[in-house]
Image: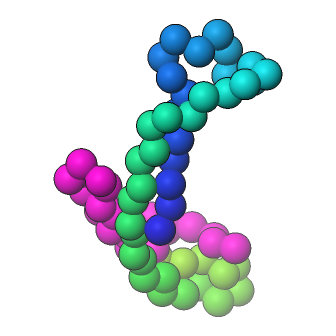
Amino acid sequence: MNVHSVSEPDAPHIFGDNPRFRYWYPALTGGLRLLIVRETHANLCLDYGVGLEGQRGFYVSFNEAF
């Protein structure tokens, strides 16, 4: 689970003295990691995520994780 936040569009700048974070976007993700190459710790990663407003995404990657 994660949450992203953005500031108001009329805020003077992102690192102002009083940042106003009004918009919160939670998401829920789940994933599977399969170790493919033990020597390099390379994984096949399969992830699926769902956002608050119905956004969905399926991600596939092959890389070193952690």
Examine the rendering and report whether any part of residue 45 can be seen. yes
Q: Is residue 46 above or below residue 9?
A: below
Please state if 11 lies on the left or on the right of 45 as rendered.
right
Which corner quadrant holds the C terminus? Answer: bottom right
Q: Is residue 10 above or below residue 53?
A: above
Q: Position of residue 20 (x, y in %)?
A: 60, 28
Residue drawn where x is 24% and y is 48% of the image: 53
Name the main secondary structure of what is drawn in magenta.
strand
Residue drawn where x is 42% and y is 82% of the image: 32
Which residue is at the far right? 17
Residue drawn where x is 66% and y is 81% of the image: 41
Between 3 and 59, the one nearer to me in the picture: 3
- Residue 42 image-quadrant placement: bottom right
Please state if 63 lies on the left or on the right of 44 as rendered.
right
Q: Position of residue 45 (x, y in %)?
A: 45, 73
Q: Position of residue 29 (x, y in %)?
A: 40, 69
**Count of numbered labels shown in the rendering:** 0
Examine the rendering and report whether any part of residue 57 can be seen. no
Stretch in magenta: 45-66
* Residue 47 colored in magenta in the image: yes
- Residue 30 image-quadrant placement: bottom left
Residue drawn where x is 45% and y is 44% of the image: 24
Q: Is residue 64 above or below residue 34?
A: above
